[in-house]
Image (cartoon, rainbow, N blue to C red):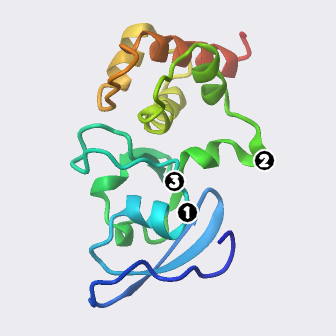
């Protein structure tokens, strides 16, 4: 539901709290149990399934989103902790369907295979490129250390991030 107030997440009978936040630039309100994780609010209540659930222990990075511009693993953030915050998901990087340079370059440079790690990897790379628009290969590798990929061997991912950085600087 793009606007308004969606139904509450399934309840275990516990008390509900109201969480108000901005998701991809849109103000949203949800009634949730205090124990609900941000990843489940995004997927189940907001319907934004680009944020993936994998390890649920903050190890793999598949659930990475931007919380007030900082890459966080949403499987270890309670939804109530995002109260008043701006959350950006992978869907939020492509407003109006125009791909962000990171998304374009992951496609062009074959930085994805199964795609499961891709949303988290791209949002982590976004934060890296905000901090340093001209990183070297070693800095990119260090910057994505908290995100696991079992398919690509990381070469194409690193190439995609470096190409996106060049594109964002107007060099591509």
Residue carrying label 3:
49
Residue carrying label 1:
47
Q: How far apart in space, not on screen, are marks 3 and 2 (Cα)?
A: 17 Å
Instruction: Give above or below for 129 relative to 68.
Output: above
Q: Residues within 10 Å of mark 2 (few under 14, many from 20)?
A: few
Instruction: Give above or below for 163 relative to 44.
Output: above
Q: Does residue 97 appear to the left or right of 54 in the view shown?
A: right
Looking at the rendering, which quadrant does residue 27 occupy?
bottom right
The percent coordinates of residue 144 (x first, y second) are: 37, 26
Residue at image x 51%, y 19%? 111
Q: Does residue 102 appear to the left or right of 144 in the view shown?
A: right
Q: How far apart in space, not on screen, are marks 2 and 1 (Cα)?
A: 17 Å
Task: Check residue 96 in the rendering and tell me which mark sits there, or answer none.
Answer: 2
Which mark is nearer the camera, 2 or 1?
A: 1
**CB contact under 8 Å: marks 3 and 1:** yes
Label 3 residue SS: loop
Q: Nearer the viewer, residue 17 or 86?
A: 17
Image quarter hosting the C terminus: top right
Q: Nearer the viewer, residue 85 or 52?
A: 52
């Amino acid at each position: 539901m793009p606007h308004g107030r969606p139904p509450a997440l399934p309840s275990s009978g516990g008390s509900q709290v109201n969480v108000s936040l901005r998701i991809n630039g849109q103000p949203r309100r949800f009634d949730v149990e205090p124990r609900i994780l941000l990843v489940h609010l995004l997927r189940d209540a907001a319907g934004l399934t680009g944020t993936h659930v994998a390890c649920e222990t903050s190890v793999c990075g598949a659930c990475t989103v931007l919380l007030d511009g900082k890459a966080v693993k949403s499987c270890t953030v309670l939804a109530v902790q995002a109260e008043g915050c701006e959350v950006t998901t992978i869907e939020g990087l492509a407003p109006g369907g125009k791909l962000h340079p990171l998304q374009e370059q992951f496609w062009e440079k074959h930085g994805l295979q199964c795609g499961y790690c891709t949303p988290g990897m791209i949002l982590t790379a976004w934060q890296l490129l905000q901090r340093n628009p001209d990183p070297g290969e070693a800095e990119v590798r260090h910057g994505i250390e908290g995100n696991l990929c079992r398919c690509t061997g990381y070469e194409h991912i690193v190439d995609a991030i470096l190409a996106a950085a060049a594109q964002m600087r107007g060099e591509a």
